[in-house]
Image (cartoon, rainbow, N blue to C red):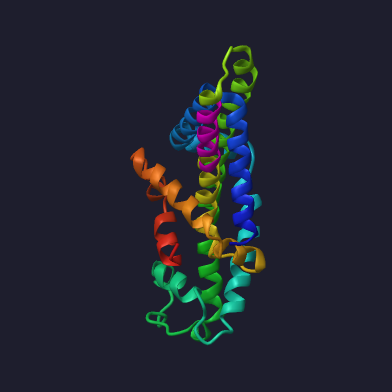
Amino acid sequence: MNIIDVLIIGLILLGALKGYRQGLLGGAVNLIGTLLGFLIASFRYQAVLAWIERYFPVHNWLEPFVYRVVWSQIQSQAQTPDGGVLPKILGGFSALFKSFPGTTGLSSLQSVSRGVLVQAAQNLSTVITDNLLRLMAFGLVFYAVVLLVHLGAGLLLPLLPLGGTLNHGAGLILGGLTAAVVLAVLAGLLSPFLTLGAGPEVAVMKNSYFYPLLVRIFQGLDRMFSLQWFSKAPGLAQWTNILGR
C-alpha cells in the first residue's frame, strides 16, 4: 500500500460520509447519476470532441507535447541493451516501417536508423494524441453530468423529510460506491498512458494495490453496458495491447 492507495481510500471514505449525510435517497440519486454520466459520456463524447475541435485547434496544441514525451522515451530506451518497451511498440506498429527496407525483425532499437525512429515517433504521437483527446472528451462529459446531478441532489434533498439510522446507513454504502465508480472512471481513462510515463510518480501509480482494482471496475462497467469503449477507439485497443496494459 502506498500514498495512492491512501488517497483512494480517503476519497471513498469522504464519498461514504457524504452519502451518510444525504441518506438513502441521496445516495441512490448520486449513484444513478454517476452511471447515467457514464452512459451519456459513452454515446456523446465524440460529438463533444467534434464541437471542441471545430472551434479550438486542440490537436495541434497537444501533439507537439506528446511527441516530445514519446521521442524522449525512444531516445532513453534506445540506449539500453533490450530497448525496454519500445521494441514492442515498434513491432506492434509494423505498418509504420513498410516504406523502410530492411527494418523487419529488428532485435533492438540500437540497430534502427534515426529516420525510422523519428517516423515511428511521429506516427505513434498522432495515434496517442487522437485517443488522448477522446479520453479527455469522455471525461469532460462524464464529470459534467456527475457534477450537475450531485449539485441538483445537494439542493433538493435537504428539502425532503428523510432521516433514521437505516436511511443514513444505506446512504453510507451508496456514497462509497458512487465515489468508487467516479474514481474508477478516472483510473480507466488514465491507464493506457501510464506505460509511456516515467519517473517516481508513475511508479507509485503502477505499484498501487487499489489502482488496478479501479481499472478493472471501469472495464467491468464497459462490459456491463456492452459499450466496449476502448475497443471502439481507433488504434487504442491495439496500442494498449502492445503496451501490456
Q: Considering only vertical position in the picture, is 88 above or below 135?
A: below
Q: Is residue 100 magenta?
A: no
Magenta span: predominant SS is helix
Question: Where's the C terminus, which quadrant?
Answer: bottom left
Q: Quadrant of residue 175?
A: top right
Span colored in magenta:
168-180
Q: Is residue 171 magenta?
A: yes
- In the picture as drawn, the residue positioned furthest to the front comes out as 165
**Residue 48: image x %, image y %?**
53, 34
Question: Where's the N terminus, which quadrant?
Answer: bottom right
**Residue 170: image x %, image y %?**
50, 29
Q: Quadrant of residue 80?
A: bottom right
Q: Considering only vertical position in the picture, is 139 above or below 209?
A: above
Front in this rendered view, residue 67 or 239: 239
Q: Is residue 197 left or right of residue 214?
A: right
Front in this rendered view, residue 112 or 40: 40
- Residue under the image location 54 percent in, 40 percent down: 182
- Residue under the image location 55 percent in, 76 percent down: 115
- Residue under the image location 49 percent in, 73 percent down: 85
Whether residue 5 is visible: yes
Q: How many marks?
A: 0
**Residue 163: image x %, image y %?**
57, 18
- Residue under the image location 40 percent in, 56 percent down: 237
Whether residue 48 is visible: no
Front in this rendered view, residue 150 or 3: 3
**Residue 181: image x %, image y %?**
50, 41
Q: Considering only vertical position in the picture, is 92 above or below 185?
A: below
Front in this rendered view, residue 32 or 232: 32
